[in-house]
Image (tube, helix red, strand yellow):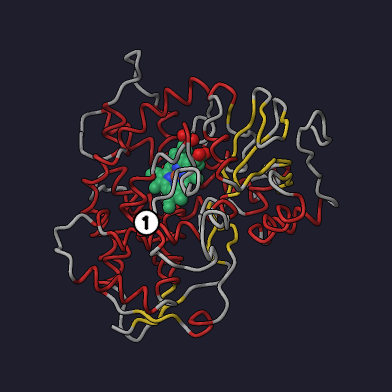
Amino acid sequence: MDSTTHGGAVALRRPRPALAHAAAAGIDFQWYFRRRRDRDGDPFLLRFPGLGEAVFTGTPEGAQQLFRAPIAALEPPRPNPIEPLVGTASLILTGGERHRRDRALLAPALHGSRVRAYGELIEESVRFEVDRWQPGTVIDARSAATAITLRVILDAVFGVGSERRAACTAAIGAFLGSFSGPLMLLPALRHGLFGRAPWDRFVAARDRLDRLLLAEIAERRGGGAGADILSTLLDTRYEDGSAISDSDLCDQLRTLLVAGHETTANTLVWALLRLHREPVVLDRLRTELRETSPAANPVELPYLDAVCQETLRLHPPVPIVLRRLIEPFCLRGAALAAGDIMGIAVPLLHSDPAVWTEPDRFRPERFLERRYTPFEFAPFGGGHRRCVGAALADLELRIAVATILARAELRLTPPLRNGGLPRAVPRGIATGPSRRVRFEVLG
Ligand code: HEM
């Protein structure tokens, strides 16, 4: 990475001392992003725990350059801290022709037109959770949201009523629970010690989950078809007519299960938190929902849509979008070499004062007043790697918010009702609120 100015190229300052900066980035990266950008300008250089050095931009111009960079010049950064979770064949980790081929296989199963058919199962999953909330009790928003989104992704992938759902739910909980922050950030800890090390527990949990996934795959290959994602993947062929192998399919399914529920769950928690701190917004949304026919498509309700977008703007659960360069590239004047990592700092992009008025305010109306470009608003990333589950996540969020508001009256517990907002901190593979978000169930 060229850190000096040559022929008008932008100079990049290295953060020092490394450890203090890594800790600051890990504890409150939104604040840290802003600090670095204010000090060094955009683009700026950052050292992230578990990732190393990367050059970040938080401007629409930078986002446009990154998303439009030639595909052949890019690959995902490796090693990636989540590699042990998703597996080397995961769509998240492959590049080049392999990525293009696998994406062509996976994307149709998650396309908006297919995903609409999952509306009913999403609503059922939300009802199943909400109908257990007893008036007078207190619920933990993250546990509730995770239960909903895990159920949704399992039903969407395997089909409603899969006999393995309960076993898979337990296996995924154990699997994700065993992949601690230190294991994610310190590859040196990824070694067994006579079955007693954290790594041994993780590997055992992953093996248990994989046995369930492979059993389901074997059963389906034997005949049982359905309208779920797994059936679609089994029916689809690569362009040369071949089918996906069992072990690659296992990695892709694990990827969908992992990428497809914590992200949406954390966004749902932020949406509920924001709504219950803003009575005017909540009232306006309730009015829209009351006046809408139950048959209406939730994705087409303008204010509900605006609330979900505004939540993703202020609280993007995937706050960095990364690419490793295979060829030299110029990002907003900074000369980058092959091997360098460049990224978008999504919270900076989503609060750029040149685009967003009163950027720190939760004001869904802004999405009714203006359309934002994919380079100004990019919670799902962009370009050839844009989130393949975006349509499912969008539908799920809208149905979950609408169903919860229709079936339950909630009140935030005192510390969060009107005190300071929690920070966004790593929560599994996504980020979520630093403090527990609890609601009293009023009815
Ligand atoms: C609110 C929910 C979600 C958010 C904010 C989100 C965000 C993202 C982002 C920012 C990326 C990286 C895009 C890029 O590099 O340009 C990504 C990739 C990905 N997401 Fe999501 N995601 C969400 C939900 C989901 C769901 C529900 C699924 C699966 C059902 C999913 C599966 C994936 C996969 C497989 C990739 C890798 C795509 C590729 O590299 O080609 N995500 N997501």
Along the line of sight, the residue nearer the viewer: 201 or 386: 386
**Residue at x-position 23% and y-position 52%:** 119
Q: Which residue is mark 1?
A: 149
Task: State left or right for residue 249 relative to residue 39.
Answer: left
Can residue 82 be seen?
yes
**Residue at x-position 49% and y-position 54%:** 174
Q: Residue furthest top?
A: 240
Along the line of sight, the residue nearer the viewer: 14 or 354: 354
Amino acid on which disc 1 is placed: Thr
Along the line of sight, the residue nearer the viewer: 355 or 416: 355
**Residue at x-position 44% and y-position 61%:** 311
Query: Which quadrant would residue 215 be assigned to in this image?
Result: top left
In the picture shown, does residue 430 fall above or below 12?
Answer: below
Query: Which quadrant would residue 169 be assigned to in this image?
Result: bottom left
The CB of the residue at mark 1 lies under 8 Å from ligand 1: yes
Secondary-structure class at tag 1 = helix
Q: Position of residue 29 (x, y in %)?
A: 66, 57
Q: Position of residue 300 (x, y in %)?
A: 25, 54
Q: Position of residue 208 (x, y in %)?
A: 46, 44
Q: Position of residue 338 (x, y in %)?
A: 70, 25
Query: Where does the C terminus fall, quadrant-wise?
Result: bottom left
| Ligand 1 position by quadrant | top left
**Residue at x-position 38% and y-position 35%:** 214
- Crowd tier of the residue under label 1, counting other residues whose Cα lies within 10 Å: few below 14, some 14–19, many 20 or above: many
Task: State left or right for residue 350 relative to residue 19.
Answer: left
